[in-house]
Amino acid sequence: MRRLLLIARREYLAYVRTVGFWLSLIALPLVAVGSGFFIAAMENSSEVREIAVLDLSGAEVGPDFAARLAVPNRVRAVPAPPGLAGQTEVPTADAAARDLVTDEGPLDGVVILLQAEDRLAARYWSARTTDERGQTAVSEALSGLNRTRALVALGIDPAAIDRIDTAPPEVTVLSPASASGGEVSLQDRLPGLIGFIVAMTLWSLILTGASILLNSVMEEKANRVLEVLLSSASATELLAGKILGVALVTLTVLLVWGGCGAVALTYAAQQGGDFAPALSGALAGLGRDGLWFWLIAYFIGGYLMYASVFAAIGSFCETPREAQTLIGPIMMVLVIPIFVLQIAMRDPDLAIVRSLSWVPFFTPFLMSARAPSGPPLYELAGTLAVMVAFTVLVVWLAAKAFRAGALSTTKLDWKGIVGLIRGGS
């Protein structure tokens, strides 16, 4: 144990003493916050599109369409220029619209309204081939206008239609599983978000922490340092010490980020609002329901499982090129939970999500997201037991591979893998 702790201390200090570690530690929250403000600033500062409307439908709906066009998006309807306003046929209107939206043209778009059987249709000329915002604005305005005209044709008052369209829907969500036993509040929704954040944090730490571990092992093997260390410590102690050291590095990162989050939460509570009290209640609820145990267990088990795999891979590699060929399949495995997590957030009891939760490589991510939704106890205990058993197997194989790889100068191949499983070196 003493040698294990010394190795862990050596790995930990090797990283936390560097300036780059602390710069990256501080930079990431700043970049995350700054990117949020930057995206918001970009959305608010986006240019207003100027779109002209030419009504060839014969129903005199141009002004109504122009009013609807400007409501939901940053779009402004402008009067049709003289060269466009006088057109009465589609071919000549298309030719005029084309000239107005060229690089030298004054407009961002031109909409030509037509009558198509019992509804209105539109031809949208845009200065950009990928004008999604303008196309969405035109589609929404046209859909609303067709709906209103159809209802008016049935004898419904247009003012009543406007009142119905502008009235916000009032839906009260109730559940006996809520904290109050009735209405579902923000506090009841936050545990699911916390589980998702835990899963994503684990995913990001595996990519960073385990990659640090792989590079450390790979560098020490190339420099023959591993051979020296194995002369004074067993392969299991060396592997466990390296994993523990890197785990302490990631724990330092979590503590610093958690401290920043606590400061931000305290500030938000002082400013008032519902989010800070709801988050505090949700965190307390996780403790009362025992969910913290499951989240921590999945987090530790998943990290240990992947860290062992990365350390074993690093012991067989001396160059980044060799490591990349072996990491590729693992990265493809890590991509799958990211896509499934989005489904698990919306429907945690979906059959495919429940099935994939029993796959050990996916368990720590999917069950972290599903645990706050209250899955059956047998799923929580069963998936955890399967993951722990698989992690023990992975650690055992990783220790054997670590020793064999550290003392070997050959590359890892299928023959070597079979030999490791059978107990050879």
Image: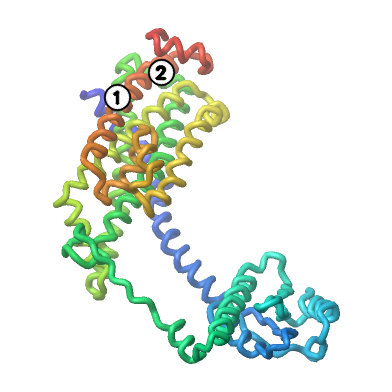
Residue occupied by mark 1: 392
Q: Which residue type does callout 2 highlight?
A: Ala
Is 345 left, or right, of 45 in this rendering? left
Residue occupied by mark 2: 401
Q: Does residue 17 appear anywhere in the picture?
A: no
* Res 108 quadrant in image: bottom right
SS of the residue under disc 2:
helix
* Front residue of this view, candidates 130 and 25: 130
| CB-based contact (under 8 Å), mark 1 and mark 2 | no
* Front residue of this view, candidates 396 and 361: 361
Render colour scheme: rainbow
CA distance separating discs 1 and 2: 14 Å
In the image, which disc is placed on residue 313? none
User: In percent of the image, x 29 and y 22: which residue is there?
Assistant: 237
* Res 153 quadrant in image: bottom right
Is 117 left, or right, of 240 in this rendering? right
* Comparing labels 1 and 2, the label whose residue is closer to the camera: 1
Q: Position of residue 342 (x, y in %)?
A: 42, 51
User: In percent of the image, x 39 and y 33: which residue is there?
Assistant: 361
Mark 1: few/some/many CA within 10 Å (<14, 14-19, 20+) = some
Q: Position of residue 167 (x, y in %)?
A: 40, 83
Image height of 418 relative to 145, above or below: above
SS of the residue under disc 1:
helix
